Every structure is written in C-alpha cells, then in structure tokens.
Image (cartoon, rainbow, N blue to C red):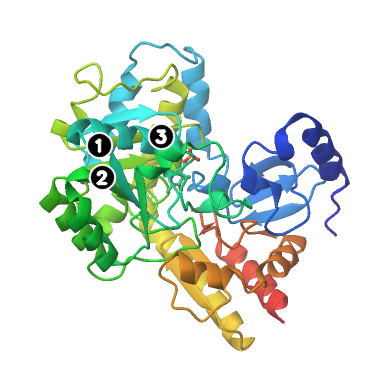
Amino acid sequence: MHENNLSSKLFNNAKQLIPGGVNSPVRAFRNVGGEPFFVRAAKGSKIWDVDNNEMIDYIGTWGPAILGHAPLPVIEAVHETAKRGVSFGIPNPLEIEIAKIIVDWVPSVEKVRMVNSGTEATMSAVRLSRGYTGREKIIKFEGCYHGHVDSLLVSAGSGALTHGEPDSAGVPKGFARETITLPFNNQEKVRQCFEKIGDEIAAVILEPVPANAGLFFPKDGFLEFLREITKEYGSLLIFDEVMTGFRVAKGGVQEIYGITPDITAMGKVIGGGLPVGAFGGREDIMNNLAPDGPVYQAGTLSGNPLAMAAGIAQLKELEKLSAWDRLEEIGALLESGIREAIEDAGRPYTFHRLGSMFCLFFHEGPINNLESATAAANTGEFPKFFHHCLSKGIYLAPSPYETGFISLAHSEDDINKTVEVIQGALA
Ligand SMILES: *Cc1c(COP(=O)(O)O)cnc(C)c1O
C-alpha cells in the first residue's frame, strides 16, 4: 500500500537542482508534512505516481482540468495545431476565436487580451487600472491571492499564506505602501478608506468568491457595495476570476451574482491545461493598452497557438456537455456524502461549496474572512486527515487553505469511494 520509493528518490534529486525541489511552493507538502509524489500520468479523475499508486484527484492541476485529465478534444486540438507550428509571434486566427468566446461568455468583457498566466493577468489589470485612472493606490483583501505580483503579495492567500513569512521578501516597501489591505466582507473599513483617500484609489481588486484561503463567500450586498463605492469615487473594480472563471458558471461569479466589474482577470480553465491567462473589460478601459494607448503590456508567447487551441477545445466541450449542470450535480453528491460522514463522526465542521469547488473546515464557523479561515486551519486536524486520505488513494490539496476541485470525469463511483475513505479518516 502506497509505496513512495521512486518519488522519494526523485525528490532528493530535485532538491539538488530546484529550490525546495519544486517549481511552485505548495507542491512541496510543507503544510501537511511528508514529501510530494511525482506524477507518471493522469487521465480522467485519476492520477498515477511513479510508484504506480492510483489516486482520485481533487486538485485537477489546481483548477484547469475541469474536463478531467488528458481530455481527448484538448489533446487532439493541440496535436493538430502543433503540426502547423508551435509559435508564430504574429497574429493567428485562433486568437480571435478565443477572444470571441470570452467576450460572448463573460458579461463584463468587451475586449480581452491574452497572457500566459493568472499572475500576468492580475499584474496587467492593476497596471491598466493605474494608467486609466492616473492614480496609484490599490485596495486588496486579506486572504485573496492574485498570483505573485509584487504589489499584490501583501496578506495574500494560497502558498503565500503559509510560506512562513507574513509577506514575501523582495517586495519593495514603496510598492507595498501603494497596496491597502482590508478584511474581506467588511464594508465599514472599505468606506472609511474611501472617505479618507478615495481620490487616490485606482482600483479595488478581489476574488469575488475567495478560494485561496479555504473557500468562503461574500456576505449579502458586499459585492454590490464594492461596485457602488468604486463607481462613486471613480475607481475601477477588478474581479480576479482566474480560479472561478468558466468553472462556477459559464460567465463566472459575475454571472451568478449579477455584478459587472470594470476589468476581469482570467486563467486556469481557459488554457485547457496550457499556460494561459487573460484580462478583459470595458472597451474604453481596454483601449488604453499599447499599441492603442499608453499602458504598455506585451508577451512573446501571448496568444500562443497551442495554448489557444487547447483553451478553445476545452471551452467548446464545456458548452457542448452543459458542464455546469453536471458539475453541480456531482458536487452536490460529494457534499451530501461528506456532510453525512462528518455528522456521523460528531465533529465540528463547516463545508463550503460553489458548484465544483469545495472546502471542508474542521471548525463550526462561521467562516467569511481570513481571520476565521485561519482559526479553522489552525485546529491542526488537517495533516492527519490529508495523509489518511492520500494513503487510501484520495488526493486532496496538501494544505487546509486550498479549495478542492471536481471535474466532469469524476463518476458516482469516485464520489462513493471518496466518501468511504473520508468516513474512515474521521473514525
Ligand atoms: C491561481 C490564481 C492566480 C495566479 O495564477 P497563476 O497562473 O498561478 O499565475 C491568481 N488569482 C487567483 C484567484 C488564482 O486562483
């Protein structure tokens, strides 16, 4: 059962050559102890490590694998496209095709630019908001993660939350001073800030449903309030939908809550597993980008044909399969199974889910900001729970601050097996 000899050997080799042995910190398992496994292959809902352990995967490469791993339409699209060349650095028709899908699907987006990661998308969105407004300060919220952008790595979620330092070293104090960090769901603090320096604020950026410090929700009226106050003071509202976009609904959180941000950052699902991000919004704002406007933004590989083909294939397949109904169905099944298991075990808990995204906290809650999410994560129950599940072939994110992802490839059998393992873990 669950040998990891080869993974362990590879990890030792990796540590000689790559800082910490990983190319992104959460992968190092520091929040749960032990060592990461190395993947041999992944298909559908399953992932196999180099020691031939089979796992049901609830990370889905941190969001992109919404169809499951290695979906045929995406593989075929990449394969066919690659035969005609893997990068051109001059426009190709696929760029228009994906832009059209994004503009059609995401309510607030009139024009869109493609980049190579979620980090690039939020970084560019922030620069654009500063260029458009001629102002410098940004409001962000504690626990929201927007990639590793200098000025946004303040009280950030995801790996940044748990890497042992309050914020990243190497971010100039001057940059951090331009970022005002406030508690999520606290209207009063936002209002006070605007009353004091509203005419200096270029933008408010947030994950409209924060999913990088566990998963929690905006209180009734919070998003509406942010929409109104930014408008009142001439600041822009930036939704970071890198994780939620195309996953929680065709048009993301903005479609579900009916709020129209000025700029939206996207990533993960739109790349079909290839490195893609995008940011888009109101046309008069987007027209400030070079070459039309004064805000410079560029990318050698932006709009890369393989990445565009993978994204287009994935998005079309989601639409064809009416994916969001099925994801809700399978998500609800997992939710009821987990709730029953943990209630039978008589343990305090909070379970949050939005469609195919879920998070189990070992704490009665309520959890609606970073402070309460941290209290829930600090109960110390997670590492043991994680390792029990992993040893039984259920791969959850290796941190109590991460959201779980379900894909279209997860079957009822997968869910039943998962619930059984979770029952065992809680016994
Ligand atoms: C993952 C994520 C990012 C960063 O995207 P990368 O592709 O990892 O750079 C930004 N914002 C949110 C909300 C994310 O979940």
Could you tell me residue 80's position as x and y percent?
A: 49, 21
| Residue 350 spot, x, y in % from top left | 50, 76
State yes or no: discs 1 and 3 in contact (Cβ < 8 Å).
no
Q: Are marks 1 and 2 in contact (CB under 8 Å)?
A: yes
In the image, 49 versus 302, the foreground residue is 302
Look at mark 1 in the image and give the residue it sits on: 129
Queried on whether the Cβ of the residue with tag 2 lies below 8 angstroms from ligand 1, the answer reads: no
User: What's the distance in space between the residues labelled 1 and 3, CA to CA?
Assistant: 17 Å
Residue type highlighted by circle 3: Gly
N-term-proximal mark, 1 vs 3: 1
User: What residue is pinned by disc 3?
Assistant: 277
> Upstream in the sequence, badge 2 or badge 3?
2
From where the camera sits, is residue 149 visible?
Answer: no
Callout 1 amino acid: Ser
Determine whether the residue tagged by mark 2 lies in a helix, strand or loop.
Answer: strand
How far is the residue under mark 2 from the one under mark 3? 20 Å
Mark 3 vs ligand 1: CB under 8 Å? yes
Count of number-bearing discs: 3
**Residue 69 in the figure: left or right of residue 41:** left
- Look at the numbered disc 1 and give the secondary structure of its residue: helix
Q: Which mark is residue 203?
A: 2
Image quadrant in which the N terminus is located:
bottom right
At label 3, counting other C-alpha atoms closer than 10 Å, the crowd grade (few under 14, some 14-19, many 20 or more) is: many
Helix, strand or loop for disc 3: strand
Q: Is residue 140 above or below residue 10?
A: below
Question: Amino acid type of disc 2?
Answer: Ala
* Occupied quadrant, residue 278: top left
Q: Image height check: is 6 above or below 365?
A: above
Q: x and y percent of residue 65 in the render?
A: 52, 45
Residue, x 24% and y 24% (percent of image)?
289
Horizontally, residue 390 falls left or right of residue 170, namely right
